[in-house]
Amino acid sequence: MLWSGLANNAGRLALTESMRGNPARASEALATSQRLRAWTITQLPEGSFERSLRAHIDEFWQSSAASASGAHERAVALGQSFTAKVEPLKPAREDEKSDWVLWLGFAYENTAASAYALGDYALAERAIARGQELRKTLTGLLAEGEGRRTTMFGEAFRAMVLVRRATLSAK
C-alpha cells in the first residue's frame, strides 16, 4: 500500500507540475509514478482485480497531466483509452468496486473538462453523466463524503455544459 500511495502522490505531483507549466518536472513525476506502480503490480496476485486496475492507472495520470497542461486532445484520447480498459474490469468486493468507481469517476471528469475546453460539449456531457451514474452506486462513507462532493461537482459541471450547448444552439 505504501508504494501504491507513493505512486499516486507522484501522479498528483505530475498534475501539479503540469498546472505550473513545468513539463519536464511533470514528466519526471510521471516516470517516478510508473516505476513505483510497476513494482506494486508485481506484488499483487496474478489475475486479481487490483493488479488489473493498477496496470492502467499510469494512463489516468498521463491524461490528468495533459488536461492540466492544456493538451486537451491528448487528455481526451488518454481518458477515453483508460475508461475503455477499466470499465470492463469486474470488481468482486465492495472495496474494489469503490476503487473502480473513484478512478473511473475522476477519469470521466478529466475527459469532460478537456472535451469542454475543446468545444465538444456532447462528449463533455456524456463523460460527466457516466461519471455521475457510477458515483450513484457508491455506498457507505464514500457515498456520504467523497461521493457527495464529487456528485455535486458533476451536477454543476453537467448543468454548465447543458447551458453552453443550449446557448450555442440558440444562435
Image (tube, helix red, strand yellow):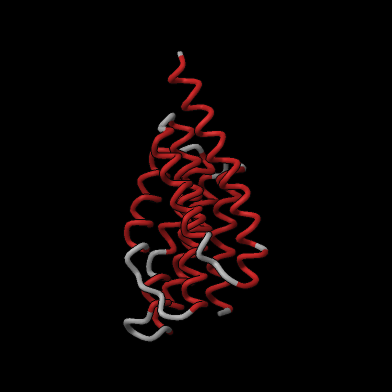
Where is residue 20 drawn, in percent x and y? 62, 42
Q: Outermost residue toward the top?
A: 171
Looking at this view, is 94 or 86 the one in front? 94
Q: Give the answer, above or below, for where 6 lies relative to 147.
A: below
- At 53% from the left and 60% from the top, the residue drawn is 136
Q: Quadrant of the C terminus?
A: top left
Position in image of residue 82 (x %, y %): 37, 57
- Which residue shows up at 32% across the image and 65% down it? 88
Q: Residue at x 37, y 81 (%)?
A: 48
| Quadrant assignment for the N terminus | bottom right
30, 111: nearer the viewer: 111
Give the number of marks. 0
**Is residue 160 shown left or right of residue 96?**
right
150 to the left or right of 55: right
User: How far across and down, in percent of the image, does residue 109 sit?
Assistant: 50, 48
Place of residue 43 in the rendered image (x, y in percent of width and height, measured from the top left) = 43, 84
Which residue occupies 52% across, 77% down? 95
Q: Relative to 66, is 89 on the left or the right?
A: left
Quarter residue 119 falls in: top left
**Image height check: is 113 above or below 139?**
above
**Relative to residue 48, is residue 71 depicted above or below?**
above
